[in-house]
Amino acid sequence: MSVVLTPPLPPMEAKSVEEIPTADGWQYEPKWDGFRCLAFRRGKEIYLQSKSGQPLARYFPDIVVALSRLPAKKFVLDGELVIDVGGRFSFDELQLRLHPAASRVQKLAATHPATFIVFDLLESDAGKSLLKVPLHERRMALEKFAAKNLKSAAAIRLSPATTSLAQAKKWFDKAGGNLDGIIAKRLDAVYASGERTAVVKVKNIRTADCVVGGFRYASGSKLIGSLLLGLYDDAGLLHHVGFTSAFKTTEKRALTKRFEALRKPPGFTGNAPGGPSRWSTERSGEWEPVDPKVVVEVTYDHFTGDRFRHGTRIVRWRKDKAPRQCTLDQVAHREGRAIALLG
């Protein structure tokens, strides 16, 4: 069959569920903490596509080189781009790659090379589309492709997969560091491009007790938009680790009154909030410090780079807990070392 797959190709997506599927007929994989990527090769031409359909090759020249050195001259691979920094995948370092200056990208690539973790083969090295082939056959084809092409390719790795629920649960327990959770795919399903019908994802939601060290007003308002969260280190310094804005509109007036009454510098005595960052959708860099007296329990799905990846959700206010009991050791072990799963 001639080549039929061309970018942009919508990747198969996953529906979020709360529990790992336990019935027969599922394949389980680690959910890696990186950038989704489709890699196309047509002889000397390499094209990297993001989940949203945008080109990525200019930001990952190291992966382009690695793919060009594979024996196979044509293929389409689905996988995840990650960057290992000190034994952990750094999402922060991935974000830095999205830089307009090619010289800066090259320097970053030389300092911290990326890795492409492959979990699906959409077109064989013979130019045959595998989109209509069931997953269990695609996986066998991928493993054969890996055996022929990836043995000496340090930057291109095969993602593990299993049909063992026990193994999937072990991977799930590692979630929170290099892993986002678990992906489960129907073994009998074809590659449903752009759909969420054959794949589910399970994230390991965790909780932490945090100190409110400050707040930000909502844009164009004198009502609270978000609370700034902190955790203490062993030296007694309070470090900013994230924010929560998940409270009802009807609660904002009371929360504003409560925390305005607690305004008192410095708020955070360690790492303090800065201006807008890649971690936040907050537009304003201005924030109000408060006396760190209030403790709140929040849920989070990922802790990396010394802070919560996304905004957190409030579980309850902890009047029963002293602020100094809210320490970084609650989350430090979540930055786990799961790279060993790649063998």
Image: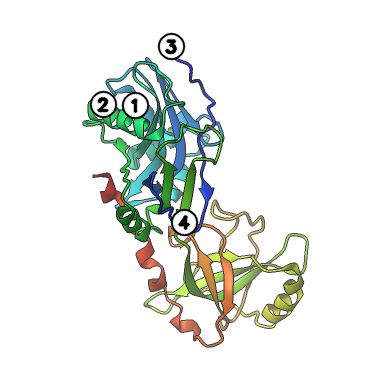
User: As shown in the figure, which amino acid type bears the numbered disc 4?
Assistant: Lys
Q: Closer to the N terminus: mark 3 or mark 1?
A: 3
The residue at which mark 3 appears reads as: 2
Q: Closer to the N terminus: mark 2 or mark 3?
A: 3
Q: Give the colour scheme shown.
A: rainbow
Query: In percent of the image, x 47 and y 32: which residue is there?
Result: 191
Label 4: element kind: strand
Label 3: element kind: loop
* Image vertical order of residue 162 relative to residue 241, above or below: above
* Image vertical order of residue 308 relative to residue 106, above or below: below
**Residue 238 in sight from this viewpoint:** no
Q: Quadrant of the N terminus?
A: top left
- In screen coordinates, is 72 left or right of 277? left
Q: Quadrant of the C terminus?
A: top left
Q: Around disc 2, counting alpha carbons within 10 Å, would you say few (fewer than 14), some (14 to 19), or many (20 or more)?
A: some
Residue 342, percent from left and from top: 27, 44
Q: Distance of mark 3 from mark 1, alpha carbons? A: 21 Å
Of tags 1 and 2, the one toward the viewer is 2
Q: Closer to the N terminus: mark 4 or mark 1?
A: 1
The residue at which mark 2 appears reads as: 149
Q: Are marks 3 and 1 in contact (CB under 8 Å)?
A: no
Q: Distance of mark 2 from mark 3, alpha carbons? A: 21 Å
Query: In percent of the image, x 29 and y 49: which residue is there?
Result: 339
Q: Around disc 4, counting alpha carbons within 10 Å, would you say few (fewer than 14), some (14 to 19), or many (20 or more)?
A: many
User: As shown in the figure, which amino acid type bears the numbered disc 2?
Assistant: Asn
Q: Which residue occupies the foreground of this view, 207 or 21?
A: 21
The residue at which mark 1 appears reads as: 67
Q: Are marks 4 and 1 in contact (CB under 8 Å)?
A: no
Residue 150, percent from left and from top: 26, 30
Q: Distance of mark 4 from mark 1, alpha carbons? A: 30 Å
The residue at which mark 4 appears reads as: 203
Residue 37, percent from left and from top: 45, 35
